[in-house]
């Protein structure tokens, strides 16, 4: 018996970094997925197979003893093994089409899909979204203790959501979002620590920026409800100014944003910054101009919204 679950990648439309300090954020799940398959074994081990390599450790091993990329899976396996007496071993296999380390929520999606897959294997029929989300956030905290939980939330529920309310925002117009990858890998933990330092050095300005971000998000929700893509684009560019000010941008990201500026309604970093991806809102008639404007060494794709969120099933 195999338990198979999949979860979508995500983009942060508004509010990255500030969300770690309690502001609202708007996120969207997109049409790239990670699939996690789990099954019982008799090997008395926890085995994890992924593009990052293979891990096999005795069932008694703690997540703290393994390399960081495997920690969430060993944490989840332990948690389930401890509450399910009959398990003699667990094998977890991860197949992902989400690029790693570029701000598209690869690790959160893995945590969500793994939580759903392992939970369904051990407690068939008891899975529910709230439980999956709690487990996924706990698993992600094994590698990134300060996570806002926003990424795992949108990977669980799908669609466009406001965080932390988890209210869905209906997009009645097509969001033509281009995601362009700077091809510079980033480290979320380091970028978040950098922003913490900015806050320590200038509490007053940081608090003003948090207020601006919250205000902006209120306006964004209005713009989306009114199908006003021009206003939405302008607000993305406004958000980018705040991200520039907290110093999570760099010349490469700025160049990419400015290359697309003649055709985009607005653009910004998505995710932790210091590398990773930018998103640009682009009218349909300009989509074919994107390749000529971006440098050849950058990858890009057009993002479609995922409305399903995490899904799971048992395969006999
Ligand atoms: O770049 P990513 O996908 O790791 O996104 C990080 C988003 C932050 O707001 C910087 C951190 C968080 O936990 O929300």
Image: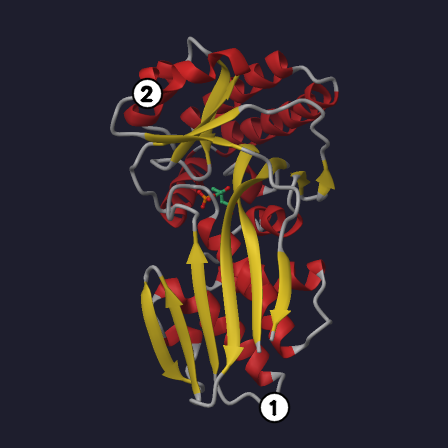
- Location of mark 2 (residue): 294
| x, y percent for residue 72 | 47, 66
| x, y percent for residue 279 | 47, 27
Q: Looking at the image, is 53 positioned above or below residue 300? A: below
Label 1 Cα neighbours within 10 Å, binned few <14 / some 14-19 / many ≥20: few
The residue depicted at 30 percent of the width and 36 percent of the height is 183
Res 123 → quadrant:
bottom right
Farthest residue in the top direction? 262
The residue depicted at 63 percent of the width and 57 percent of the height is 311
Farthest residue in the front direction? 316
Res 297 → quadrant:
top left
| x, y percent for residue 33 | 51, 49
Res 158 → quadrant:
top right
The image quadrant where one finds the C terminus is bottom right
On residue 308, which mark appears? Answer: none
- Location of mark 1 (residue): 85
The image quadrant where one finds the N terminus is bottom right
Taking the image as shown, residue 51 lies to the left or right of residue 236, namely: left
């Amino acid at each position: 018996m195999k338990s198979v679950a999949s979860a979508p990648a995500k983009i942060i439309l508004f509010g990255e970094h500030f969300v770690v300090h309690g502001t609202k954020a708007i996120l969207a799940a997109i049409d790239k997925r990670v699939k996690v398959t789990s099954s019982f074994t008799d090997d008395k081990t926890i085995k994890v197979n992924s593009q990052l390599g293979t891990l096999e450790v005795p069932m008694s091993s703690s997540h703290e003893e393994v390399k960081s990329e495997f920690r969430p899976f060993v944490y989840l396996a332990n948690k389930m093994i401890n509450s399910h007496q009959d398990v003699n071993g667990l094998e977890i296999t991860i197949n992902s089409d989400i690029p790693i380390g570029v701000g598209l929520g690869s690790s959160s999606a893995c945590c969500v899909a793994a939580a759903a897959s392992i939970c369904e294997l051990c407690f068939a029929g008891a899975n529910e979204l709230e439980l999956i989300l709690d487990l996924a956030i706990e698993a992600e905290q094994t590698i990134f203790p300060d996570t806002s939980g926003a990424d795992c939330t949108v990977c669980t529920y799908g669609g466009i959501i406001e965080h932390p309310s988890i209210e869905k925002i209906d997009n009645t117009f097509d969001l033509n979002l281009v995601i362009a990858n700077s091809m510079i890998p980033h480290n979320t933990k380091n970028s978040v620590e950098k922003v913490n330092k900015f806050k320590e050095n200038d509490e007053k300005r940081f608090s003003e920026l948090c207020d601006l971000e919250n205000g902006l998000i209120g306006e964004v929700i209005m713009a989306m409800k009114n199908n006003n893509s021009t206003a939405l684009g302008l607000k993305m560019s406004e958000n980018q100014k705040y991200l520039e000010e907290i110093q999570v941008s760099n010349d490469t990201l700025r160049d990419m944003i400015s290359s697309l500026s003649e055709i985009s309604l607005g653009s910004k970093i998505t995710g932790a910054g210091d590398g990773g991806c930018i998103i640009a809102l682009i009218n349909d008639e300009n989509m074919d101009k994107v390749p000529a404007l971006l440098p050849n060494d950058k990858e890009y794709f057009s993002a479609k919204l995922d409305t399903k969120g995490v899904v799971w099933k048992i395969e006999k």
